[in-house]
Image (tube, rainbow, N blue to C red):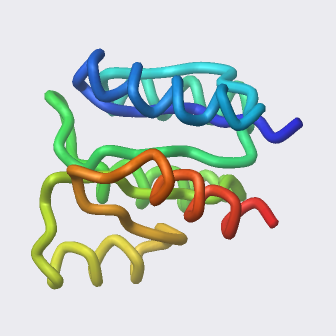
């Protein structure tokens, strides 16, 4: 079973993402609401996939991607953000995100991207 960590400052959004993924038989091994917690959790648990919000209380998702790449993290990264400007999307992808979904999204969109990344 593929292991996933969900990172979003909104408990509501983390719940929506977790519910969609667990209903599709993915294993949610952790969640974080801040960048610092996310980095520690990811490096400790080494998930197959990270869903990553871009706007967190203490840092940007883009900064988290940089930190993880510096640590040679090999987890797939799916950014999920309300920030939909093409320049931000392009920056996320160029820094190492594997895919980017703009909020709001459907559970089907989420599962489709996760399936592609973990295939």
What residue is drawn where x is 47% and y is 67%? 97
What residue is drawn where x is 15% and y is 83%? 87
Q: Position of residue 29 (x, y in %)?
A: 68, 21
What residue is drawn where x is 31% and y is 53%? 105
Q: Is residue 101 above or below residue 108?
A: below
Q: Is residue 114 above or below residue 58?
A: below
Q: Position of residue 108 (x, y in %)?
A: 50, 54
The reply, left or right, for residue 78 in relation to residue 9 is right
What residue is drawn where x is 24% and y is 26%? 9
The reply, left or right, for residue 57 in relation to residue 52 is left
Q: How many numbered circles are shown? A: 0
The reply, left or right, for residue 81 in relation to residue 25 is left
Q: Position of residue 106 (x, y in %)?
A: 37, 50
Q: Position of residue 65 (x, y in %)?
A: 43, 57
Toward the viewer: 90 or 2?
Answer: 2
The quarter of the image holding the N terminus is top right
The quarter of the image holding the C terminus is bottom right
Q: Is residue 19 above or below residue 52?
A: above
Q: Quadrant of residue 70 in the image?
A: bottom right
Toward the viewer: 109 or 42?
Answer: 109
């Amino acid at each position: 079973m593929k292991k996933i960590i969900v990172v979003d400052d909104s408990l509501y959004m983390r719940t929506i993402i977790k519910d969609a993924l667990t209903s599709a038989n993915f294993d949610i091994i952790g969640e974080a609401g801040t960048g610092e917690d996310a980095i520690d959790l990811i490096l400790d648990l080494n998930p197959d996939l990270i869903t990553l919000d871009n706007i967190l209380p203490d840092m940007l998702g883009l900064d988290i991607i940089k930190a993880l790449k510096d640590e040679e993290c090999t987890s797939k990264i799916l950014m999920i953000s309300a920030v939909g400007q093409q320049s931000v999307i392009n920056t996320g992808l160029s820094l190492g995100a594997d895919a980017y979904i703009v909020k709001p999204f459907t559970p089907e969109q989420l599962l489709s991207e996760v399936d592609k990344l973990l295939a």
